[in-house]
Amino acid sequence: MPQLLLPAKYVKLGYQYLVNHILTFLLLPTMAAAAAELLRLGPDEILSAFRSLHFDPIQTLCTSFLIIFVATVYFMSKPRSIYLVDYACYKPPVTFRVPFSTFMEHSRLNLKENPKSVDFQMRILERSGLGEETCLPPAIHYIPPTPTMDAARGEAELVIFSTIDSLMEKTNLKPKDIDILIVNCSLFSPTPSLSAMIVNKYKLRSNIKSFNLSGMGCSAGLISVDLARDLLQVHPNSRALIVSTEIITPNYYKGSERAMLLPNCLFRMGGAAILLSNKRRRDAARSKYKLVHVVRTHKGADDKAYKCVYEQEDPEGKVGINLSKDLMLIAGEALKSNITTIGPLVLPASEQLLFLFTLIGRKIFNPKWKPYIPDFKQAFEHFCIHAGGRAVIDELQKNLQLSAEHVEASRMTLHRFGNTSSSSLWYELGYIEAKGRMKKGDRVWQIAFGSGFKCNSAVWKCNRTVRIDFAAAGDGPWQDCIHRYPVHIPEVVKL
């Protein structure tokens, strides 16, 4: 059997090389024939043929004007390049850590009248893929938890200000240099807004374009990137600061409904600050990445998709997030829609042709033909899959036919930091960089899912080989532990 598979492998590689370089194969014989003809004629005949041509000055002038006009229209209508200068992720202090033993002890004390709910949380935690170093805010460490407004604001200030300070230090960014501010936090939306809190803290300019996104779930980080891209297209020579976080304090569920206890087991503290720019002269050379595509898919028109991640009250009046049993099925459908849109933008011609031929074959010849899953490894070197949970990563690895190394960043981020919501993608990108795997020209696919239900994608291209000097880079999130990763994560951790 291996003897038969080996030639098939090389046949596919040959097919991919042929189709992806078809223009080269067509142009080379043409250029060779033209060169041979020129050599045959000789310089005297070529010069004689050129002199025999007659150029009308008016026609030449009109042609030149037309060429200049078309070139001007092309360059004027061409979208501005958007650069990711740098980003920073929040690293909680050691005192915020919640080992399994601490989490379960608190659960037993808080839910002492519901032992079945405690057992349910234990089973979830054993299979969650989380490690012993994930963190929760101080208010959740109390027994019972004290989710006050002051505690929630305190967590927001700690996470957001820490990440912005770190980003400013890394990029030498001054508050006056920020033209656009976008903050996304799904469940905590105070008045004044979190964006106003940042404006007040850093004394940002009065004409800053400020936005605060809420209720958009774990995919809101890429929605912020999309919004920033659109704004940077219409505002030249500008920089956009994006802050992605989820404030845990006011959203810790204190009831006993199983579907609403699940987020308590998975969600942890985290946040990220990202600096985007369209300043080609100042920021292009020093930026890490260039934004290539953003694709957003919204399945909210379907009732099941709309309610699969739903904030509500339980029978006792306690508010929490209800995660539907259909969540993975709905996420799979949203991913299919997103892939259908992003595939033609990123896949090489060889994969698009195979997908097209399979689609035609299923429509015309046999509907039972197995649908062809495009090989996205041909389009990307790195994958950042939202670390929403072990099941999410497993499902995408299976559907996209990815290797263990391709999903390593997602699994290790879930293990070390838990589900940090919209900021998890940036911890994953930080992991790839910390491992020294990000090279110039590499392409990165970020995939996130969120309530509503949404599946959003962003494609980045690395501008330069990223080398992390932890001694000079400050206290990055992976600084003290990257040497320990990757780690083996068992299917079940017995507690």
Image (cartoon, helix red, strand yellow):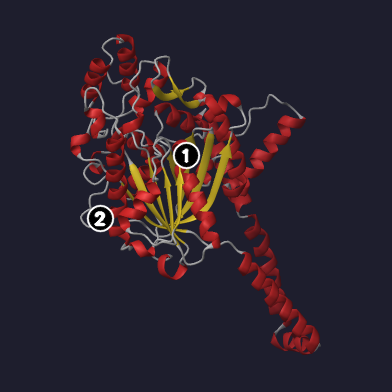
- Badge 2 element: loop
Q: In this view, does 494 lie above or below 153?
A: above
- Which residue is at a point 73% across and 85% down the rendered structure image? 46
- Which residue is at a point 30% across and 17% down the rendered structure image? 122
Residue 376 appears in the picture as rendered: yes
**Residue 210, horizontal then vertical, whole percent:** 45, 53
Q: Mark number for residue 105? A: none
Q: Is residue 246 left or right of residue 494?
A: right
Quickly name the residue at label 2: 473
Q: In this view, does 338 lie above or below 257?
A: below
Within 10 Å of the Cα at label 2, are there few (<14), some (14-19), or many (20+) other Cα atoms?
Answer: few
Q: Quadrant of the C terminus?
A: top left
- Sequence-first disc among 2 and 1: 1
Camera-nearest label, 2 or 1: 1
- Which residue is at a point 38% across and 26% down the rendered structure image? 263
- Badge 1 element: helix
Q: Which of 385 and 348 is in front in this view?
A: 385
- Distance (Cα) linking label 2 and label 1: 28 Å
**Residue 178, horizontal then vertical, whole percent:** 40, 61
**Residue 454, horizontal then vertical, whole percent:** 53, 36
Quickly name the residue at label 1: 219
* Amino acid beneath label 2: Ala
On the image, which quarter does residue 240 sit in? bottom left
User: Which residue is the extreme one toward the left?
Assistant: 95
* Amino acid beneath label 1: Ser
Q: In this view, does 355 lie to the left or right of 141?
A: right
- Which residue is at a point 51% across and 50% down the rendered structure image? 226
**Residue 174, horizontal then vertical, whole percent:** 33, 63
